[in-house]
Amino acid sequence: MACFSKLFQAVGLTMLAQQVLAAQLYALHYTDGVHQLEFSEENGLNVVSVTVHGSPMLAWLTWDHANRNLYGIDEADGGLISWAAAEDNTLTETANVPALGSGVSNALYGGADGDGFLANAHYSTSAITTFKLPLGADSAQLQEFTYTMDGPGPNPGRQEAPHPHHIIPDPTGTFLVAPDLGADILRTYAVNKESGELTDCGGPSTQPGAGPRHAVFWTGASSRVNRRQGAGTKLFIADELSKTVSRWAVAYNGASGCPDLTLEQTLTPYADNATAIEGTKVGEIKVFGNHLYISNRNDKSFGEKNCSLSHYTLSETGEMTWSEISPAHGWYPRTFDINAAGDLVAIGDQTTSNVAIVKRDVETGKLGDLVGNLRIGVEGTPESEDGLSAVLWIDEGA
Ligand SMILES: *[C@@H]1O[C@H](CO)[C@@H](O)[C@H](O)[C@H]1NC(C)=O
Ligand SMILES: *[C@@H]1O[C@H](CO)[C@@H](O)[C@H](O)[C@H]1NC(C)=O
């Protein structure tokens, strides 16, 4: 009996170890559903479950790691969907709330732990909206900020109107920034953490025609003091239209909650600051320690349907130095995410609708070999809002 129990324990532990080793992800397809994926070096990348969302054009996922809730926003009707994740990461829809159309991203903010409210960026409807969490049948919009422009910007095809594309809280949770691709403005909002109320602070203009798309904050490697006080904080922006990445200094203004942002550096995706080819659109931006990454959609660096990611190293003060480009292993890398350990990167290629997993060297930050690759749902069509829209590691914080 004792022997049997030992054996049982050993088998149990092996199973547990396997569960720990297999990392999990959510990959969102615009029309096909949320795919729960499992990755291990032995078995590659596999689908565990598919949760059909029934939404016309789901564009984005926000993962609330602490509360194990997932949020999606729709690029057509703007609807907000929330799911609860079970222990095994399978999803159950908990709310589907009508919202202003053309939602392209959202983020958690406010409350005691930074997860009390949801802020949404709406592209074609030129707006930012907020909701209190959790979402439910009675959920109603808290605030809406809608913007207009006197005339088109330098890129009239894309800048005919304001287009907020992303919204994220700063590391202290005192303000939000929303890059506006149409208006060339980094819009900032002071946060009332208790009520979730936002105060529109305005914000600086980018270089004309930059078309800022996505943002990421950086507080320096291993700097808890910086994170708490905001000292030395930098903001990095993926400029979709000018095909560049830029660094902004963040200065806090005490009780006002409205920061000052100052442009400090701009680089292209390539060696010697070479200009990206026509048709390239800089997409996602992520930082891990002193390493910054952007994705270069449709740049054809590694083939007709094989785009690139650029890697920059950051100095102690956040100055970017271009390091190298690496393949996206597909066409139109709209989204990518670095795991919590920093040794794997999941790349979501929109048009080829595949998730590619590549190794990441934790010392040098270089992206390496392809170790997993999987088509998700039906392939997209070039320059259309279909195919793969988002990917994230379930181990990551919000
Ligand atoms: C790199 O190119 C960008 C975009 O053209 C430009 O704004 C920036 O000043 C250039 N930087 C350097 C160091 O040449
Ligand atoms: C993309 O380029 C890399 C580097 O040349 C290559 O190893 C890989 O097979 C290519 N993938 C596709 C899908 O073309």
Image (cartoon, rainbow, N blue to C red):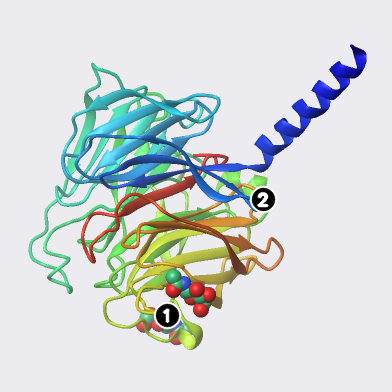
Q: Are marks 1 and 2 in contact (CB under 8 Å)?
A: no
Q: Read off the residue under disc 1.
A: 301
Q: Can residue 298 be seen in the rendering of this structure?
A: yes
Q: Residues within 10 Å of mark 2 (few under 14, many from 20)?
A: few
Q: Where on the image, by quarter, is ligand 1?
A: bottom left
Quarter-of-image position of residue 364:
bottom right
CB of residue at label 1: within 8 Å of ligand 2? no
In the picture, the quarter occupied by the N terminus is: top right
Q: Amino acid at mark 1?
A: Ser
Q: How many marks?
A: 2
**Mark 1 → mark 2, Cα distance in angstroms:** 35 Å
Residue 13 in which image quadrant: top right
Given the current orientation, which residue lies at the most extreme top position?
1
Q: Nearer the viewer, mark 1 or mark 2?
A: 1
Query: Percent from the top left, x then y, of residue 234?
Result: 51, 59
Decide which of tag 1 and tag 2 comes sooner along the chain.
Answer: 2
Can you identify the residue that label 2 sits on?
223
